[in-house]
Image (cartoon, helix red, strand yellow):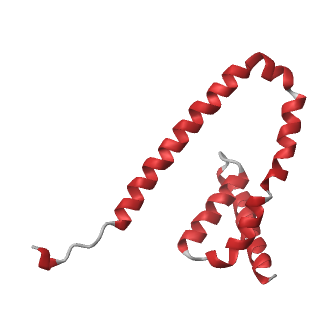
């Protein structure tokens, strides 16, 4: 129970900070600023990843409930999908490929840089 409260507080702090950042900077949605801050604070160790892991996994497991409103939006604008369906699918595929490629390149670059073993002076 403590971990759930800890996770809710951590996410709430980041979302509120994201809203404040959005009001100052603008540009990206406030929730995206909050997610970026949440990820950064987890990476920096300000939030304990072990405490938020279980609650975050539960949220991801039940995330499908969040997409029901999106499905309703698709049904409400079905005529747009009839007219521009192929274009929308093409855009989704191309941007997904670009995003996955970009994330893969960055992950490979940064993860291989971290995992290279240190060279001892005795090897020379």
Identify the image quadrant of the N terminus: bottom right
Q: Is residue 62 above or below residue 44?
A: above
Residue 92 screen position, x and y as percent: 64, 32
Q: Considering depth in this image, is 68 or 22 the residue closer to the camera?
A: 68
- Front-most of residues 39 and 51: 51
Asked whether residue 47 is in view, the answer is: no
Q: Which residue reaches farthest left? A: 124
**Among all residues in the image, which is located at the extreme front?**
61
Residue 85 shown left or right of residue 95 in the figure: right
| Residue at 54% across, 37% down | 97
Name which residue lies at 13% across and 75% down. Answer: 123
- The answer to whether residue 13 is above or below residue 111 is below
Could you tell me residue 80's position as x and y percent? Answer: 81, 21
In the image: residue 118, left or right of residue 70: left
The correct choice, above or below, for 98 with respect to 16 in the image is: above
Residue 117: name its quadrant: bottom left
Q: Residue lying furthest bottom in this view?
A: 2
Q: Residue furthest top?
A: 83
**Which residue is more in the foreground, 19 or 105?**
105
Which residue is at 55% across, 69% downward? 43
**Above or below, comparing residue 64 to residue 124 in the picture:** above
Q: Position of residue 50 (x, y in %)?
A: 64, 78
- Image quadrant in which you'd find residue 83: top right
């Amino acid at each position: 129970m403590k971990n759930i409260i800890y996770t809710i507080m951590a996410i709430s702090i980041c979302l509120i900070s994201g809203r404040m950042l959005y009001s100052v900077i603008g540009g990206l949605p406030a929730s995206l600023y909050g997610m970026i801050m949440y990820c950064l604070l987890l990476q920096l160790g300000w939030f304990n990843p072990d405490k938020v892991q279980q609650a975050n996994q539960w949220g991801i497991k039940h995330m499908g409930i969040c997409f029901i409103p999106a499905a309703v939006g698709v049904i409400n604008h079905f005529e747009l999908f009839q007219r521009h369906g192929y274009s929308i699918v093409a855009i989704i595929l191309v941007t997904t490929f670009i995003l996955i490629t970009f994330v893969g390149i960055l992950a490979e670059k940064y993860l291989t840089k971290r995992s290279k073993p240190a060279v001892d002076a005795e090897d020379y």
